[in-house]
Image: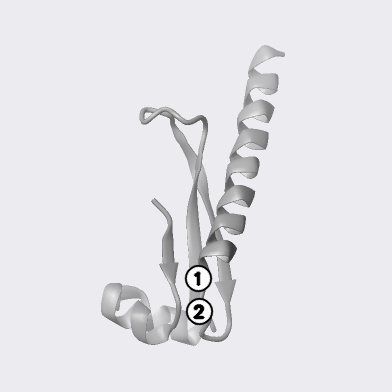
Amino acid sequence: APVVIGGHAEYAARYPAVADWTERNSCRATAIFPLVAGAAASAPVLGVVAFDYDVDHAFTDDECAYLGALAELSAQAIDRALAYEAAE
């Protein structure tokens, strides 16, 4: 499932172990999506993609849907590249 964090205070509340790191590295807000190969529940996770902001950011539902679509397309591209590479 995606992880969406709108600001440093939310980072500190949800992930206190990384709150200092995010502050030092100007990561104030982030939206993190898994790169999943396929729609099945058992589909492998190929990685993650993170969209970071250096200021607090209120993510809208439309923005999250758009970023999620980018993540899905990225996962498809990676999955196809891996299949192509395996077929060689």
| Residue name at image x 54 percent, y 84 percent | 26
Point out residue 25 in the picture as x, y percentages from the top left corner: 52, 81
**Relative vertical location of residue 24 with respect to residue 86 in this rendering, above or below:** below
Instruction: In this rendered view, identify the residue nearer to me: 14 or 20.
Output: 14
Residue matched to label 1 = 30
- Position of residue 59 measured from the top left corner of the image (x, y, whole percent): 52, 72
In the image, residue 78 sits, relative to residue 5, either above or below, namely above
| For marks 1 and 2 on the same chain, the one whose residue lies earlier in the sequence | 1
Which residue is drawn at the image coordinates 44% and 32% (left, top)? 44
Describe residue 21's horizontal placement relative to residue 74 as left or right: left
Q: Position of residue 35 (x, y in %)?
A: 52, 43
Q: Look at the numbered discs 1 and 2 and tell me whether their residues touch, using CB distance below 8 Å.
A: no
Total residue callouts: 2
Q: Quadrant of residue 54?
A: bottom right
What amino acid type should be assigned to the residue bearing mark 1? Thr
For mark 2, what is the residue? 58
Q: Position of residue 37 (x, y in %)?
A: 52, 32
